[in-house]
Image (cartoon, rainbow, N blue to C red):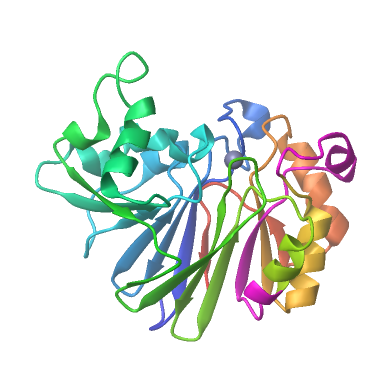
Amino acid sequence: MKEHNMCLTVLGARGSLPVSDTKRSRFGGATSCYMVQAGSETIFLDGGTGLVSAPARFEKTPVILLSHLHLDHVIGLGMYPRLSQDGTITRLLFRADTEDEMRALLQQLFSPPFWPIPLTEYKGTLLLEPLKPTLRIGDVTVESIEGRHPGGCLVFRLKYGDKRLVYATDCEPDDPFFSKLISFCDGADLLLYDGQFTEKDSITKKGFGHSTAEKGVELMERCGAKRLLLIHHDPQASDEELLRRERRFNSERIRYAREGEEIEI
Ligand SMILES: [Zn+2]
Ligand SMILES: [Zn+2]
C-alpha cells in the first residue's frame, strides 16, 4: 500500500440477514463489515457477521464505528476474535449520549437469554465512546451526517491525506437527505452505497429505509465520485442476479462488493 492510501477490505456485504449457500458464495453471505486501513490505523465500519473474519492483531488500537444498531450491523461483535484475547483493547463508537447509555444498549442484546455474557466481560477490552459528528483517529478524520432509515443511521466520511471514502449504508434517498448526501460525498474516491433494492422494491417497500443501484449511480454522477461500490445486498439475491445487475452498468467504476476483496483507494 502506498503512503497516504487507504485500503478497504470487504468482510461482509450482505444486508439484513446472513446467508450461506453455494448460490450466494461469490458475493458472500456475511453481513455488513468493512475494514479500512489507513497508515497504521484500522477502522471497522459496522460489526455485522463479517467482523468474525477480522484479524486479532493490529499495529495500533483498532476502532469499530457503528452506523446504527440494527442486528445485521452489530451481531458480529459477540464473536470478534480480538475480544477473546487477554490484554487487547478495541475502541467501539456509536451514537449515544454517554458511555452508560452505550453499555445499556449493547446489554439489551448481548446478555442472557440472547447471548451468554455481556460484551464488556470478555478477556479483551471494549472501550465504549459516544460518537461525535467529527472525530480524529490518528491522521484519519471521520465525519458523519444523519441518514434516512427507520430508527436512524449515520453516513460516514473518512478523510486520509487527499483520499475520501464515504460509507452510506441503509439509507432511503428521499429529499432533503439525498441533496445533503450529494454535497457530503463531493469528490469521493470511493463511495459505498446501499444498493439492496431493485427499482420495483423501491416502490413496494417505501419507508423500509433502503436504496437502489440506480440511485447510487445518480449520486456518483452528481457528486463526482470516482468509484461506486454497491453494498447491503438483498439476502435473497443470488450471485447470478447480482452479476446481472452489475453488468447492466457495464463500467469498471460501478461494482457490487464481493466478500473478501481488497480495494486500494
Ligand atoms: Zn442493514
Ligand atoms: Zn438498518
Q: Which residues are magenta?
A: 183-209
Q: Position of residue 216 (x, y in %)?
A: 76, 60
Q: Residue furthest top?
A: 113
Q: Is residue 175 visible?
A: yes
The answer to whether 237 appears left or right of 128 in the picture is right
Tell me if residue 184 comes above or below residue 114 in the rendering: below
Q: Is residue 202 above or below residue 43?
A: above
At horizontal 88% and vertical 45% (from top left) the residue drawn is 199
Q: Residue at x 72, y 61 (%)?
A: 177
Q: Is residue 262 above or below residue 69?
A: below
**131 or 196, which lies in front?**
131
Q: Indicate which quadrant contains ligand 1.
A: top right
Q: Residue furthest left?
A: 87
Judge from the rendering whether residue 83 lies leftward or rightward of residue 212; answer left or right: left
Query: Residue 186 in magenta?
Result: yes
Number of numbered markers: 0
Q: Quadrant of residue 251?
A: bottom right
Residue occupying the point 43% across, 33% down: 75
Q: Quadrant of the N terminus?
A: bottom left
Q: Nearer the viewer, residue 167 or 57?
A: 167
Location of residue 71 in the rendering, given as x and y in whole percent from the top left corner: 50, 32
- Decide whether residue 206 is among the magenta residues: yes
Residue 185 shows up from this direction? no
Q: Which of the 4 image quarters holds residue 122?
A: top left
